[in-house]
């Protein structure tokens, strides 16, 4: 059983070990949110944050998400939840691709499981979102990591 997830910021490489602080019912609700986001192309509204939506894709057991504003479609963050060591390097390198400003952390691949976060340009103009995004990322990460079946 996973006891913590590494929460890592691209560029700075700052990382913290985050234990699960969610009840199973909360995780199940977040899993439903993830499922709806995976089914939609235009993003799933974020519960409690009506001005924002998350789009998501799953590949090889990893989850790649982007959070943005619904009014102007501005991306705020992209984050990837990685469940296995075999996925860790490839996902980490992909998050850095095309973002030379984050080169300082490119060689510092975190240990799985991790939730790696890349700030997008729109985040600097939306400090209201910055106040809740870390908690949201971790709720999504724990819901993904603890799901009953992990795809190969």
Image (spheres, rainbow, N blue to C red):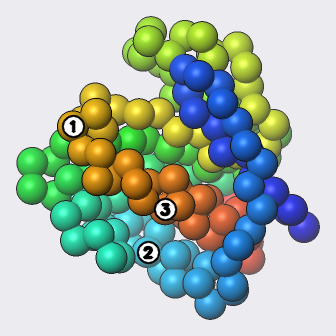
Looking at the picture, tell me which residue is in the foreground, 9 or 88. 9
* N-terminal label among 1 and 3: 1
The image quadrant where one finds the N terminus is bottom right
Q: Are marks 3 and 2 in contact (CB under 8 Å)?
A: no
Q: Is residue 120 above or below residue 105?
A: below
Residue at point 38%, 66% (across, down): 37
Q: Are marks 1 and 2 in contact (CB under 8 Å)?
A: no
Task: Give the image location of residue 2, x and y in percent.
Answer: 85, 62
Horizontal side of 37 relative to 122 (left or right) equals right
Mark number, residue 125: 1
Disc 1 element: helix
Q: Is residue 41 above or below residue 25?
A: above
Disc 2 element: helix
Outermost residue on the left side: it is 71
Task: Give the image location of residue 129, x and y in percent.
Answer: 32, 53
* N-terminal label among 3 and 2: 2
Which label lies toward us, 3 or 2? 3
The image quadrant where one finds the C terminus is bottom right
Q: Is residue 17 above or below residue 86?
A: below
- Mark 2, Cα crowd under 10 Å, few <14 / some 14-19 / many 20+, is some
Q: Which residue is mark 3?
A: 136
Q: Are marks 1 and 3 in contact (CB under 8 Å)?
A: no
Task: Give the image location of residue 94, x and y in percent.
Answer: 54, 26
Mark number, residue 33: 2
Which label lies toward us, 1 or 3? 1
* N-terminal label among 1 and 2: 2
Residue at point 54%, 76% (across, down): 31
Q: CA distance from mark 1 to mark 3?
A: 19 Å
Q: CA distance from mark 1 to mark 2?
A: 26 Å
Q: CA distance from mark 3 to mark 2?
A: 11 Å
- Mark 1, Cα crowd under 10 Å, few <14 / some 14-19 / many 20+, is few
Q: Is residue 24 above or below residue 59?
A: below
């Amino acid at each position: 059983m996973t006891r913590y997830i590494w929460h890592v910021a691209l560029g700075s490489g700052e990382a913290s070990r985050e234990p699960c602080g969610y009840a199973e019912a909360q995780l199940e609700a977040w899993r439903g949110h993830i499922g709806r986001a995976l089914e939609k192309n235009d993003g799933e509204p974020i519960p409690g944050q009506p001005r924002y939506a998350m789009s998501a894709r799953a590949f090889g057991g990893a989850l790649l998400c982007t959070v943005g504003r619904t009014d102007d479609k501005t991306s705020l963050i992209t984050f990837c939840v990685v469940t296995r060591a075999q996925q860790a390097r490839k996902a980490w390198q992909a998050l850095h691709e095309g973002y030379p400003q984050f080169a300082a952390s490119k060689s510092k691949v975190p240990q799985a499981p991790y939730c790696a976060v890349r700030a997008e340009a729109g985040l600097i103009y939306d400090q209201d979102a910055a106040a809740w995004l870390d908690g949201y990322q971790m709720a999504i990460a724990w819901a993904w990591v603890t799901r009953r079946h992990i795809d190969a």
